[in-house]
Amino acid sequence: MPQSSNAEYRTLTDSSMENQSRTRKLPTGQPRDSFAYWNGATDPGHRHSDPWWIEFYAKELLLYFPAKPGRVLECGCGTGVFYSYFKSHCESYLGIDFSESMLREFRLAWPGVQLIRADVANLNLGEGALQQGSFDFIFSNQVCQFFDREKLHAHLETLAALVKPTGSCLIANVPDVQLRLYYYACALRADRSRSLLSGLKQIVAAVIRRADGIGYWYSRREIAEIARSFGFECESFSSASFEYRFHLRLQKK
């Protein structure tokens, strides 16, 4: 699989629901400035967007869904590109994203789906559908890389408040800081020429510019320790879709 890079973030052409061609805008700029990065974007910018890959991504995430998900909250739902695979596994579904342009695409594709425009790291608990202990399952995919430590802490605290005492959460596809050098050196892929020196140069450049096209990298232990402080038990799994990422499944104690 080819690595993702800033070069992937370009304007694409896709088909509308009426099979008419329209321009799809991928995110641009600095991922750590998440609001600016996603402002105006209408495409989530997945490494692969072919239907087969979208199905693969979605079915991998479904492996970590509980047997009976019940009431489900997706944090950072974007355009709802995976929703067709998730909807039959939910008794009810609520999607949250702060990008109005992304939510607009979701509504065009799936009219009537319950969506909220909000920052998942700074939700107003007790407002509308966001009642304490009201969700059986909460998940996100490729979202926590846009949170600094403070926002990540606030996000996990919010998950602990929103999920039911018997509920669970999935934090999917987090960039693994322990694999960062190997990622840059192309040492995780058999189809690329490995170069430790090149990897070190890219890390230094990313630190200096504070940009690498991904955002924040985290260790499994770091996120798990924060989650445990809010009463979660944690399991971690390597991602099958992205060789440098991991998933964390959180279960209320």
Image: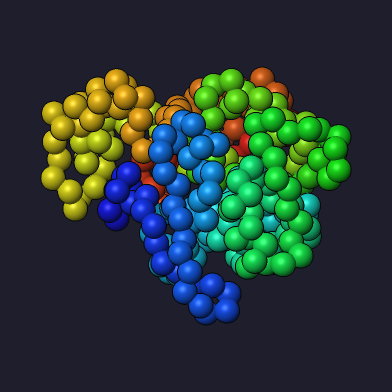
Residue drawn at the location 20% of the way across and 36% of the way down: 185
Residue 130 placed where, x, y %? 81, 40
Residue 244 placement: quadrant: top left
Seen from the viewer's position, the closer of residues 62 and 202 is 202
Residue at image location 63% in from the left, 68% down from the top: 109
Q: Is residue 45 something that shows in the picture?
A: yes
At 54% from the left and 72% from the top, the residue drawn is: 16
Q: How many marks?
A: 0
Residue 152, given in percent of the width and then of the height, sits at 58, 27
Q: In screen coordinates, is 247 left or right of 48?
A: right
Front-most of 99 and 143? 99
**For residue 216, what is the image quadrant?**
top left
Vertical position of residue 191 compared to residue 128: above or below:
below
Instruction: Tell which of 236 and 94 is nearer to you.
Output: 94
**Up-down relation of residue 170 to residue 70 (above or below):** above
Left or right: where 86 falls relative to 201: right
Picture residue at 60% right of the left edge, 65% below the top: 85
Q: In this orientation, which residue lies closer to the viewer: 129 or 141?
A: 129
Q: Quadrant of the C terminus?
A: top right
